[in-house]
Image: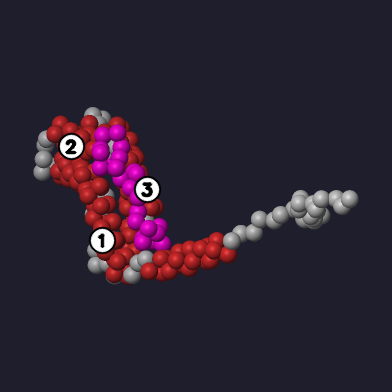
Amino acid sequence: MQSPPRTDPPHVALRQAAWPTRRAPRLLYVAVALLLVFGATVALVHRPSTAQRASDLRGFLHDMTTAIQSCAGGVSESLTALHGIESGSSHQVTDAIGVAQDGASNCSLANSMSIDDLSSYQVTESLASFHLATVVEGLVTWAQPDAVNVQTDIADVLAARTPQARSKAQAALDQALRALNAQRASVDAVMQHAITSTSAHASPPTLPG
């Protein structure tokens, strides 16, 4: 008697394969390469021209002038008031002291919104090579403590009632003016270099001293 034919599938021995390895698809490599090329192209395309940098620099100088002009104006008025009293062309000592005190207050970060805004000013990337961030920091320092000190000392000189007190106040004022003028020269040098390099045909903020 014959056995019935088998209908189950034939046995096939399984092969032991090595652990599967994940291969990055070729499209991934292509995409990365395209991104690198795109990034380099964008950098070249957006490299600012000299004309663009000059335009950006003029905008920067305008912003600096706007931010510092109120404080600078106060310093100028305070010095004018002092010279008026010293020359005898004015005898309004109390008014002159008030001008100097108000000017000092107007140059402080706590009381001047424009100086406070200046302290957080961000220089546009196209001007990065000129290190104008040091100008921003330098102008803030020119305002406070330098301009504050000058005007406070002017008020002290005007308020002095004895030769000794006046001499001491005058010595402090002379020292404060030297610091103010040195700071002005420092920031002016950086700005003038940028102006010359870009042929911007502009001027730095006018800072008295």
Q: Is residue 41 above or below residue 22?
A: below
Nearest to the eye among marks 3 and 1: give it: 1
> Judging from the image, what secondary structure is the residue with disc 1 in?
helix
The residue pinned by badge 1 equals 58
In terms of sequence position, does the residue under pointer 3 or pointer 2 come before the other? 2
Label 2 Cα neighbours within 10 Å, binned few <14 / some 14-19 / many ≥20: many
Residue 27 at x, y percent in the picture? 54, 63
**Three-letter amino acid code at disc 1?**
Arg
Tell whether 130 sits left or right of 85.
Answer: right
Query: Which numbered circle lies on residue 183?
Result: none
Question: What is the tally of numbered marks visible in this picture?
Answer: 3
The residue pinned by badge 3 equals 137
> Judging from the image, what secondary structure is the residue with disc 2 in?
helix
Magenta stretch bounds: 109-131
Q: Residue furthest front?
A: 1
Residue 96 at x, y percent in the picture? 16, 36
The residue pinned by badge 2 equals 99
